[in-house]
Structure formats: structure tokens, C-alpha cells
Image: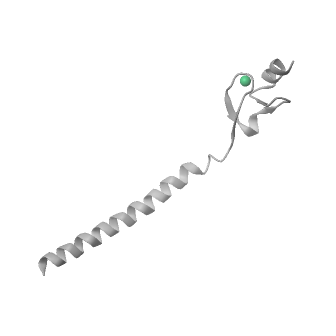
Amino acid sequence: MKALLILVAVLISVWLWRNRRDSGASVSTKQPAEPKPQDMVRCHHCGMHIPGNEAVVGKQGSYCSAEHQRLSES
Ligand SMILES: [Zn+2]
């Protein structure tokens, strides 16, 4: 009977630990994922990766600067 009580206590503590770990993990995985959905594009001239909203879009692709667009397309 005592062994059964110990087993139940262990099972409850494992269940509580897993619940706490799962909720903690979902919070920690949520936070770094939020600022990320900004697509990175590769500069057609030098290969540097830049955020899509900062890229200079040219005829042959995206560029990190207007200078690289000019150098690549002229
Ligand atoms: Zn570049």
C-alpha cells in the first residue's frame, strides 16, 4: 500500500513537471519567433544577406545598396 502511494506521488510530480516544462517551452519558443518573419534576400552583386524591406530591387535581383545595383547592371 505504501509503495502504491509513493508511485502515485511520483507520477503526479512527473506530470506536474512535464506540464510546467511544456508551458515554459511554448513561451520560450514563441518569443524569438516573433521578430523573425522578415524575409532575407541575397545581394545579387556581393552575396550579402539583407532584410527584404531594405533591399534595392533591380532588374536582375535584389541588392544591398543602389551602388551594387549600378555596378551589377551597368
Ligand atoms: Zn551588395
Please tell me whether residue 15 is drawn above or below residue 5 in the rendered image. Answer: above
Give percent across and percent down for residue 59. Answer: 86, 30
Give percent across and percent down for residue 25. Answer: 45, 57
Give percent across and percent down for residue 61. Answer: 79, 31
The image quadrant of residue 20 is bottom left
Q: Residue furthest left?
A: 2
State the count of labels: 0
Q: How is the image coloured?
A: one colour
Nearer to us in this view, 22 or 44: 44
Q: Residue at x 73, y 38 (%)?
A: 52
Give percent across and percent down for residue 7. Answer: 20, 73
Q: Residue at x 23, y 69 (%)?
A: 10
Please tell me whether residue 7 is drawn above or below residue 69 in the rendered image. Answer: below
- Left or right? Give the position of 74 relative to 52: right
| Quarter of the C terminus within the rendering | top right
Q: Residue at x 45, y 63 (%)?
A: 23
Q: Residue at x 29, y 72 (%)?
A: 12
- Left or right? Give the position of 69 relative to 38: right
Q: Residue furthest bottom?
A: 1
Task: Tell which quarter ligand 1 is in.
Answer: top right
| Quarter of the N terminus within the rendering | bottom left
Please tell me whether residue 43 is drawn above or below residue 27 in the rendered image. Answer: above
